Every structure is written in C-alpha cells, then in structure tokens.
C-alpha cells in the first residue's frame, strides 16, 4: 500500500463527505424558508452556517467559507437577542398589566415646551408614555402627569385617528412605540399581544370607573365647585 494510494483514498473520502455536507447545508437553507417563527429559523440558519463552513473548508471554497464564517456569529447574536426579547415579553405578560412593563420596548424622546405631539384627527401611529413633564390635551384642558399612558386607544379604533390633540406644556421626556413595532412584537410572540390586550382593557376599565364616578351627584357637585379634576377617561 503506497502513500500515494492512501492519500488518494483520503481525498476521495473527504470529497464524499464534503459533497454530503453541501447537500445537507442546502436542505437546512431550504427548511429556513419553511419556518413560521423567528427562533427556529435562526437555529436552522446557525446549523446551515456550520455545515456550509465544513463543506467549504473541505472543498476549498474560500468565498463560501468566508461568507458563512461571517454569518455564523451574526446569527448567534440575533438568536440571543430574540430569546432575551421573548423572556422580557413573558415577564411582562405575567400577572397584572402594568404600564411600566411596556417601557423596555419603547424609545425615549425629549420634546421642548409647546411641541405639538399630534392633533385631533391625525393618524394614530404610535403609543406614548409620559416619563417627565406635562402634556396638555387642549380640547378638555386636561394636563397629563408623569406615569400616564396616552395615545393607545386610537391605534385600535376602526378609523385609527386621534380623538384629541396633545401638546407639551413644558419640557417632556416621552417613551414611544410605533404601531409597526407593536405589530411586529405581537407577531413574534403572542404573549405580547396578550399583555397589550390586558393593558388596554385595564385602561378602559379604569376609564369606565372614572366615567361612572363623574356621573355620581357628589362628584359632579365637587367638579362644579372646582374640587375635582377632569377624569382621565375624557382624554380618549
């Protein structure tokens, strides 16, 4: 048995395995297009990257090797990010629906005094959470205080329009989340949709209780005397 014969057998063996690795990698790529949820898709993408790296190294395909050696850490990073997102969503969806649980999914923006956030009749494109400052609802003369969620009802009305205007009566810090981001989070994990439903129902229930309180004779008398503020339900 000569050395040349042994090397030829080894090359043939490696060639067979590299060809099988290529077929397997192609099957994994095909399966990624069949996935409906993001995490299984990412797991399959990572698997295909690994198999393609093996295939390209055995076949001497440097461009393919470099491509999947670059894609592998990127897919791992995105998978970790998605898993962390799902964990945050699961934590937010457990128990009572608290507005603060929504903050990690929002982007904070600073608005100077007199900034018009939106007008009555505008398209409802985002939901807001007031972190600092005051927001005036001019139609009813209501000042929203820090810790108030506003603009969420318009996102889910048939017309998807604002029912009132909102203006910064002083410098404000406001957390915002777009309707597109809300939709993406709902599609990626139904638990987020459940949490958001609980949050809006809790808000509507609170608004209903305040509206009923506003119709109570004693409460109406207090408002007429200036001892009570306009209920939050009237800003929707």
Image (spheres, helix red, strand yellow):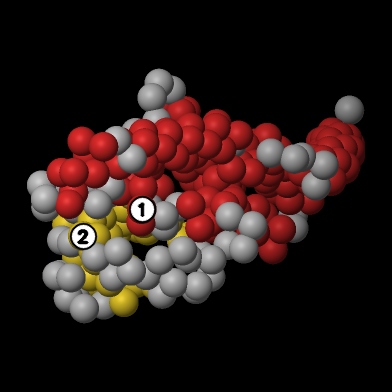
Residue furthest toward the top? 95
| Depicted 69 relative to depicted 198: above or below | below
The residues tagged by marks 1 and 2 sit, at their Cα atoms, a distance apart of 12 Å
Q: How many C-alpha atoms fall within 10 Å of the one at disc 2: few (<14), some, or many (≥20)?
A: many
Q: Mark on residue 166?
A: none
Residue 87 seen? no
Q: Which residue occupies the foreground of this view, 115 or 31? A: 115
Q: Residue at x 46, y 63 (%)?
A: 163
- Residue drawn at point x = 42 percent, y = 34 percent: 205
Residue highlighted by disc 2? 143
Out of 137 and 230, give the one closest to the viewer.
Answer: 230
The residue lying toward the viewer, choosing from 121 and 222, is 222
Is disc 2 placed on a helix, strand or loop? strand
**Image height of 133 relative to 198, above or below:** below
Above or below, 118 against 61 in this view is: below
Q: Position of residue 191 (x, y in %)?
A: 55, 31
| Residue matched to label 1 | 234
Measuring from the top left, give residue 186's x and y in whole percent.
59, 43
Give the quadrant of the N terminus: top right
* x 40%, y 66%: residue: 164
x then y, percent, for residue 124:
51, 65
Q: For the residue carrying disc 1, how many other residues have a C-alpha within 10 Å: few (<14), some (14-19), or many (20+)?
A: some
Residue drawn at 36 percent across, 53 percent down: 234
Question: Is residue 229 shown left or right of residue 1?
Answer: left
Question: Residue 59 vs residue 16: left or right?
Answer: left
**Front position in the image: 79 or 189:** 189
- At mark 1, the secondary structure is helix
* Numbered disc in front, either 1 or 2: 1
Q: Earlier in the sequence, mark 1 or mark 2?
A: 2
């Amino acid at each position: 048995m000569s050395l040349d014969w042994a090397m030829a057998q080894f090359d043939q063996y490696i060639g067979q395995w590299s060809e099988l690795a290529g077929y397997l990698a192609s099957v994994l790529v095909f399966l990624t297009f069949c996935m409906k949820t993001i995490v299984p898709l990412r797991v399959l993408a990572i698997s295909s990257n690994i198999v393609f790296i093996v295939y390209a190294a055995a076949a001497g395909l440097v461009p393919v090797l470099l491509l999947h050696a670059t894609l592998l850490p990127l897919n791992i990073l995105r998978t970790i990010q998605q898993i962390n997102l799902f964990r945050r969503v699961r934590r937010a969806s457990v128990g009572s629906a608290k507005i603060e649980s929504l903050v990690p999914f929002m982007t904070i923006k600073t608005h100077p005094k007199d900034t018009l956030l939106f007008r009555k009749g505008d398209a409802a494109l985002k939901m807001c959470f007031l972190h600092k400052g005051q927001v005036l609802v001019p139609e009813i003369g209501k000042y929203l205080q820090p810790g108030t969620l506003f603009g969420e009802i318009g996102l889910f009305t048939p017309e998807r329009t604002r029912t009132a205007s909102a203006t910064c009566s002083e410098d404000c810090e406001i957390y915002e989340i777009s309707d597109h981001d809300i939709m993406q989070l709902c599609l990626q994990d139904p638990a987020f949709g459940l949490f958001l439903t609980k949050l809006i129902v809790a808000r509507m229930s609170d608004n209903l209780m305040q509206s009923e309180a506003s119709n109570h004779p004693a409460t109406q008398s207090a408002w007429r005397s200036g001892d009570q503020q306009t209920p939050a339900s009237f800003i929707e």
